[in-house]
Image: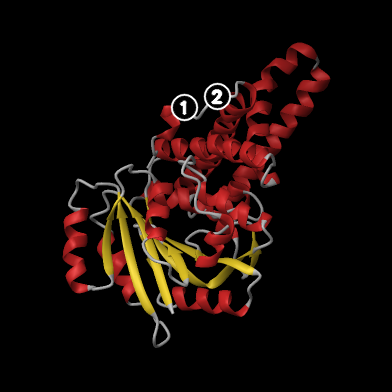
């Protein structure tokens, strides 16, 4: 049996050693051949040199150049390296649990209706802001019902992070869409479900993830998520999940609220009450999840950033892709992290 692990990477000299070492420390069945491909976007921080050193320590490790420096190209370049039985995608800041690979293989081999498996995320915070952001993103209020980041029990879902696929899935439905600078995994997993496959979240496996922590980066990241989600919707002529519609509705609601007082107080006050309910829910989850006043205040601040940035990006995507029929803007092709 052959497993290929694909690591999209750019300028991750601080984390790539731990990422690679954890993969080669995986508890695998005898006779399993493991190959790991660091697909590097021409790093200039010493990452490439470190990977070349690690190749002496781990003969199954290889460095692949990604001259286009974009994530979907990295995914596909790694998958192309060999026709393995299973493909595992791992972020350069992620550290797999020792049972991750084998558990995914066991689940996929036991049920051919399952085409994709992923597990939990255990966040490691590089600063206090990153920790606060992660807490907010672990709530259903922050990320929406059904999001894999909020799941605690194993079961079927619509997408997962750090996925493993049997190689035949790519032969059946194609590879990652290289037009999608963001949401390429979202698009691919939607294609999986449209083709009749199931996606499984396994709670007993996890990745440790080093969280970047600043609010401006969070805003740009989720703005791009919303923006590119519309591109995916246009491609498939379908809304992939209903929860994606809530943030743009929230942004429109906030925009229209001040104008309603000019129309009718009977409209303004009910809408103001709805906004008050939103604030009360944000306050409730902030106090519930926060440890002390300062942390609760940070979580309370994070919720509207998550919702407004995604919603604003989604509405810009509607304008560009649906109304104007334009191509993605160059600004939104630049990675935000």
Q: What is the crowding at mark 2: few (fewer than 14 residues within 10 Å), some, or many (at least 20)?
A: few
What quarter of the picture does the C terminus occupy?
top left
For the residues marked 2 and 1, what is the alpha-carbon distance in whole angstroms? 8 Å
Which residue is tagged 2?
A: 326
Q: Tell whether 206 sits left or right of 310.
A: left
Q: In this view, does 97 lie above or below 307?
A: below
- Residue that sits furthest to the bottom in the current view: 30
Viewer-proximal residue among 140 and 322: 322
Q: Nearer the viewer, mark 2 or mark 1?
A: 2
Q: Which residue is drawn at 24% across and 73% down?
A: 58
Viewer-proximal residue among 188 and 312: 188
Q: Is mark 1 on a helix, strand or loop?
A: loop
Q: What is the crowding at mark 1: few (fewer than 14 residues within 10 Å), some, or many (at least 20)?
A: few
Report if residue 118 is visible in the image. no
How far from the left and from the top, in percent, is residue 146? 65, 56
Q: Do the residues labelled 2 and 1 touch (CB within 8 Å)?
A: yes
Q: Residue at x 58, y 53 (%)?
A: 139
Q: Is mark 2 on a helix, strand or loop?
A: loop
Q: Tell whether 227 sits left or right of 82.
A: right
How far from the left and from the top, in percent, is residue 160? 55, 59
> Residue 84 appears in which quarter of the rendering?
bottom left
Q: Is residue 304 above or below residue 108?
A: above
Report if residue 255 is visible in the image. yes
Viewer-proximal residue among 27 and 243: 27
Q: Residue at x 47, y 70 (%)?
A: 86
How far from the left and from the top, in percent, is residue 332? 45, 32
Q: Tell whether 249 sits left or right of 57.
A: right
Which residue is tagged 1?
A: 329
What quarter of the picture does the N terminus occupy?
bottom left
Q: Residue at x 29, y 47 (%)?
A: 41
How far from the left and from the top, in percent, is residue 5? 39, 66
- Residue that sits furthest to the right in the current view: 266
């Amino acid at each position: 049996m052959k497993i290929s692990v694909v690591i999209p990477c750019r300028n991750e000299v601080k984390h790539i050693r731990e990422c690679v070492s954890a993969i080669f420390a995986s508890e695998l069945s005898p006779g399993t051949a493991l190959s790991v491909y660091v697909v590097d976007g021409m790093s200039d921080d010493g990452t490439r040199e470190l990977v070349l050193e690690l190749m002496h320590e781990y003969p199954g490790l290889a460095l692949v150049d990604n001259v286009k420096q974009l994530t979907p190209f990295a995914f596909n370049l790694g998958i192309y390296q060999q026709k393995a039985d299973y493909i595992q995608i791992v972020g350069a800041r992620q550290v797999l649990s020792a049972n991750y690979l084998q558990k995914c293989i066991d689940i996929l081999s036991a049920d051919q209706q399952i085409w994709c498996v992923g597990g939990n995320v255990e966040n490691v915070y590089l600063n206090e802001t990153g920790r606060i952001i992660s807490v907010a993103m672990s709530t259903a209020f922050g990320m929406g019902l059904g999001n894999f980041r909020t799941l605690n029990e194993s079961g079927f879902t619509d997408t997962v992070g750090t996925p493993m696929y049997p190689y035949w899935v790519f032969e059946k439905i194609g590879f990652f869409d290289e037009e999608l600078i963001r949401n390429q995994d979202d698009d691919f997993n939607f294609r999986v479900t449209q083709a009749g496959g199931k996606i499984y979240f396994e709670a007993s496996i996890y990745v440790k993830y080093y969280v970047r922590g600043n609010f401006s980066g969070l805003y740009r990241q989720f703005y791009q998520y919303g923006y590119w989600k519309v591109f995916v919707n246009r491609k498939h002529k379908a809304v992939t999940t209903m929860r994606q519609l809530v943030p743009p509705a929230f942004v429109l609601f906030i925009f229209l609220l001040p104008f309603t007082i000019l129309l009718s107080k009977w409209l303004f006050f009910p809408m103001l009450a709805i906004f008050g309910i939103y604030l009360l829910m944000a306050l409730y989850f902030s106090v519930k999840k926060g440890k002390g006043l300062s942390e609760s205040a940070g979580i309370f601040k994070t919720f509207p950033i998550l919702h407004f940035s995604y919603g604003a990006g989604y509405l810009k995507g509607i304008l560009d892709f649906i109304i104007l029929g334009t191509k993605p803007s160059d600004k939104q092709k630049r990675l935000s992290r």
